[in-house]
Amino acid sequence: MESAEEDSLHGQSSEDEASELSDGEVGFMLASKEGLKQCLADFRKDLPWVERLDMTNLPAEDVVSKTEVKVPAETNRELDADDDFQREMFFYRQGQATVLEALPLLKAHNIATKRPDDYFAEMAKSDQQMQKIRQKLITKQMILERSEKAKKLREQRKFGKKVQTEVIQKRQKEKKAMMSAVKKYQKGMTDKLDFLEGDQKAAKNSSDGSKKALAKKGPNAKRKFKDQKFGFGGKKSGKKWNTKESFNDVSGFRAKTAHDKGARKGKGGNKNKNKRPGKSVRRKMKGRS
């Protein structure tokens, strides 16, 4: 009853408001309605699809729901507009369906859908801005490299300290054992001197090991070149001295060379050959002629 009374009162108030409007206002409303219809007719121009490029599509088939044997929510009219994921997936599949339908139409109208290989578009950001970004990236990379390097150094220091402590502990242990052996010997508890031979054996083993390493490695290229040029060491002086064997060896003796009977070789071998006469002799020869 109350709702019926409210409806009757509302109808009476609307009739009163309509009766209060003047004739001019009613005409303006009618003219505005006609103008809106005219504008709507102007919008609805019969243009080809290439000029409009408008598409009205249903969403594409939900492949995920199909593989999982689930009924899509929008087919059951259960699409929840407040569910962000469901709403965005609906928009995504609708755009996918639009692309699948629009690409054949664009190819049919000879409209390119891919960018040419020689197409260079202007960048949205300037070179100065890109240089700043590049510098920032380089700075970040340098910071990361420094941190990694510092981390490695810390690990190496820890490992070095560990090795050093192990070596010190080993030396202390050996020293303690040696001191105990010396005390036993001093007290007459033992007559063995093995603790002294241990150091000698260790030194001998280390020297033998170094010699073997050198013999295995061999001389380097510089040492080989010097050996080839200057010899392999040893005594250098006195190489031309006579010995008993060289004194008794006369196989290289030549009589002509020894008694100056043969022609001398060297710089002074042909010293008097083609000698020029003196000045007085040349004058006499000139006077005779």
Image (cartoon, grey):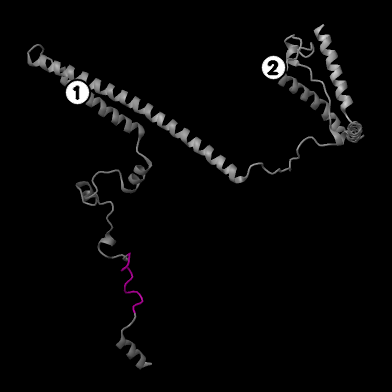
Extent of the magenta region: 265-275
Quadrant of the image for the N terminus? top right
User: Which amino acid is tagged 2?
Assistant: Asp
Image position, residue 243 (x, y; %): 20, 48
For image coordinates 86% across by 36% down, the residue present is 51
Image position, residue 228 (x, y; %): 35, 46
The residue lying toward the viewer, choosing from 101 and 287, is 101
Residue 185 appears left or right of 236: left
Quadrant of the image for the C terminus? bottom left
Q: Nearer the viewer, mark 2 or mark 1?
A: 2
Residue 117 appears left or right of 36: left
Using the rendered view, name the quadrant where residue 189 is placed.
Answer: top left
The residue lying toward the viewer, choosing from 27 and 155, is 27
Q: Number of labelled discs?
A: 2
Q: Is residue 266 magenta?
A: yes
**CB under 8 Å between discs 2 and 1:** no
For image coordinates 25% across by 61% down, the residue present is 258
User: Which amino acid is tagged 1?
Assistant: Asp
The secondary structure that dominates the magenta segment is loop
Image position, residue 26 (x, y; %): 90, 31
Q: CA distance from mark 2 to mark 1?
A: 84 Å
Residue 83 got which mark? 2
Residue 20 got which mark? none
Q: Secondary structure at mark 1?
A: helix
Label 1, on which residue?
199
